[in-house]
Image: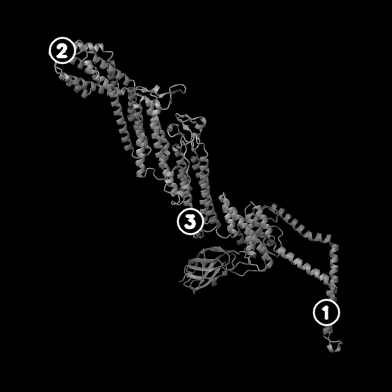
Amino acid sequence: MPKEPKVTGLSPNEGPPGTKVTIRGENLGTGATDLTGLTICGVNCLLTAEWVSPSKITCKTGLCKGKGEVIVTTRSGGLGTCTVTFRGYVMQTGPLEESAVWIDESTTTDKRGRSKSSSALFRKNEDPLGMSMEGKGKFPIDQLEEMFPEGSGDPSNDKFLSEWFLIENHHHTSFEDLKTGLSYLKRKSTQRSEGPLAFMKGNLTSIMDCQDALAVQQGQWMKATSAEDTMHQDLLKDESTSEGGSITEKLETLLNNANEKANAMYQDVLGRKDKADATRNALNVLQRFRFLFSLPGSIERNIQNGDYDIVINDYAKAKSLFADTEVQMFKRVYLEVEKQIETFRGELTEKLMQLPSSLDEQTKLIRYLMDLGAPGDPAWDCLVNQHRWLLQLLFSCKEEHIKQAQTIPSVAGSEGDTPSHTPLKYRPSVGTPGSVFTPGHSSVKRIPSFGSTQSPDQAGWKFKTPQRVQFVDDLTDVLLENFPDLWKLWEGYSTGSLLNETAEKADVANQEKETRFKKMVKEVMSVYSKLLRAAFLPQSLSSLPKEERAKYGVWPEGKYDNMAHWLPQFVRTIRSCNSTLSGMNLPDETTHDVRDVAQDTRVHCVTTLLQQATEDVKALNDRETWTVERDDRGGITTLPLLFENIITELIQHLKEVVQSRAEESEIFRRADTRMKVSKLCEDMLSAFSDTMDQLAFRTETEAEATPTSQQPSSGHDELTSPSEHIPPLERRLVTVLSNCSHTREKVLPKLIDLLEKNGYPEVQKVQKGSQSCFSALDEKLFDAYLEQKADPLVGALEPGVYAGYFMWDDCLPPRGVRNYVKEALMNLIAVHAEVFSISPLLVERVLSRLLQALAEEMLRLMECVTEWSANGANQARLELCALQDALALYKTPESSKSFHDALQMVPPVTSAADRKNLEELMNKFKSNMQLQLTCFRSDSLKRTLV
């Protein structure tokens, strides 16, 4: 048996008439022909119903109000049921809005939706009861519509229901308050009704006069009506009975005569009337179109006041209204407006091309010109003009600084730089040009270069910022202050945000000009880079043609034109500029020149400062004071410390330069750069060995030729000639040898480690080369010192052996060690004292080599003896044993072998008496020389302690 239709879902469940509703349920029919009825809130909607499936039907609602059920009727199932409800409501329809149902037009409304039938007694937000309707909460509107389907709570509505209004706005109001509100409503109604009555009482006489006048007018009208009827009857009479022709002709003649007399009588009046009507019409036209006629004066006034937006809006309005007019008067006025706007466009264009100008100002002017319909492309013209102006600024900056550099007095050089041999320690630091940073002190102090003999006025030039450094700072400021505006203007132009266009439209235009703008940006960066190269890297522009090279400027060379110590600041400025440009997301090909000059400047800074440091190290020989400072491991002068400070300060100065930033390439990525820097580092470290070599072997003549130096040991600045405090050659050799050993063993490893930590290339190669130089110097110094000491020592042995015509084959019995042995020992003691006073660690090395030389000489002397006597053999053995025993601490395998071979050349002791005698003489020698030989024994103790 078929089941009845059942509606279980609606979408939507409310809406105005004409809402398309989707009905879902069960057993909604087997087809479109099976559907016989569909009502929503009691309104038949079958005509708009569309059967989709047994569970879905769509339709449009009719003129239904309030809540109601949706009932489906089918042939197979009959009348259905519904488990959901639909709420219909009527929306106020305007005169130009479409409606799905017929609109009741019995009550019309104006354009603002207000009823014209009557005026409201109260304003919309005013409570008729005189109480506030805010803050108490209103009753739900849907419930009110269910309670009063045909009513309304609006007092101005024809269907107004007081119950609706009271429930909606005063459902929380007490009864006493409602009574008070009723009294208020009555008073307002009384006041409204008393108004016309009071008017009548105050104007009663005038009203009566008006009534009498109306009665008289009515009587006259009645008489005129009867006269017209009589005239009509006369006109109907037979024309043949009239004399003088028909009555119509007579009437026409009378009317013409009356018209002529009236015209003659009222001609002046009518002329004045026509003139007044023409004037009135003209005034009406002026009043009606006063916007157009007052527009020229308004435009001029607003332009003077700077109200450009008002000018543009008025012009756009006039253009839309009168651009195509055919009225000649309007054409003349509009033509005058166009002339004013054309002049205004020219003023805006001229103002746009005036630079410098802020980005906001340029954007406003461009938009004004576009809104005024300016010909061409103002935004692109502004970009081209700003590009040209920026190039002029860059070249003007160059010309100004070169001119100032040429006017600097020649006494201090055109750059005001420090002399080329000023040590890095006395140069201005990287962060504060012209100052030196002292560790442990927060203040900076300007220190003149070492050995300066200039006057204070001349020396003052050396600590002023060089013109080229000022030029780089100013040039970079010019670029970074103006180029971002150029780039932002292009971004706004290319994306369309500048002209309030869509990005798609802007892209079409920009595709044609993007290539040109990239060339413009690249030109700016190229000019900036080449101007920098001309100032600090002029050799990099040598390949340019002569005319183009001259365009970037040739800087004058000064007397002290040494820019090495300003290079780190120059690098910092360029890198800061490169970082700023990288943050602007410029195309890579446009900033290639800036990145290259930044990279080349970093390499140039490193190589130049390394070369300068090498020169500073070479100049240290003029700062040697020969004052030995000792510690537990020996003594050195201040020179190794000065050398270490120069290299350490250099590495610290270059630390920021060597480290690469995210947008930069590695500074040592190129093989030739690595090779060059490695060679310079090796030369810089090896230069100290050359300096010490010169110090060790400098003659007095060379010392006197060097400039005077300050003695730091004195309490005041005292100038002393170098020849007065330079020690003898032997002491110089030992001192420099000690400095060399200390530098090789202590200073070099620290410096090599510092270079490696800071990322310098091929550090192992640098270490190997510098160590080789210092080792060669050490051998040279040591050999020279041995030559100074060993030659006299060895040369005195043979004369001492044969002193007094001594003969080995004919001599007296030995009575003790002869004087030549004691003299040799005393000479060794002197050497010991000299070396020990400077570097105790060198004593063993020196005495071991001297002992070896003595042993070899004694062996040679023993080999030269052809005949021996017993006494001669005993004497030789005693002296050889005395030397060997006294210097046993410094024996080496070579010296031991030489002494052994020498003893082998001496005949052995055969008798016990001779052996005992030799032992007694040996003990006597030790006893007599105990004090002198103590130094050799103390070395043994010191060695044990070490």
Residue most extreme to the left = 910
**Height in image: 297 above or below 680?**
below
- Label 3 sits on what residue type? Arg
* Numbered mark located on residue 810 in the image: 2
Q: CA distance from mark 3 to mark 1?
A: 86 Å
User: Which residue is drawn at the image coordinates 77% and 68% (left, top)?
Assistant: 277
Residue 182 lies in what quarter of the image? Answer: bottom right
Residue 536 lies in what quarter of the image? Answer: top left
Q: Which residue is mark 1?
A: 256
Residue sitting nearer the eye, 168 or 344:
344
Q: Of callouts 3 and 1, which one flags the residue occurring earlier in the amino acid sequence?
A: 1
Q: CA distance from mark 3 to mark 2?
A: 112 Å
Residue sitting nearer the eye, 787 or 632:
787
C-beta proximity under 8 Å, tags 2 and 1: no
Q: Of callouts 2 and 1, which one flags the residue occurring earlier in the amino acid sequence?
A: 1
**Height in image: 887 above or below 581?**
above
Q: Residue 412: x and y, percent?
A: 49, 35
Question: Quick one: SS at disc 1?
Answer: helix
Query: For the residues carrying marks 3 and 2, which lies nearer the camera in this image?
Result: 2
User: Which residue is drawn at the image coordinates 74% and 67% (left, top)?
Assistant: 281
**Height in image: 230 above or below 103?**
below
* Numbered mark located on residue 501 in the image: none
Q: Residue 442: x and y, percent?
A: 49, 31
Answer few, some or many: residues within 10 Å of disc 2's Cα (few below 14, many 20 plus, some between 14 and 19). few
Residue sitting nearer the eye, 278 or 170:
278
User: Which residue is drawn at the image coordinates 26% and 13% (left, top)?
Assistant: 930
Say which quadrant the N terminus sits in: bottom left
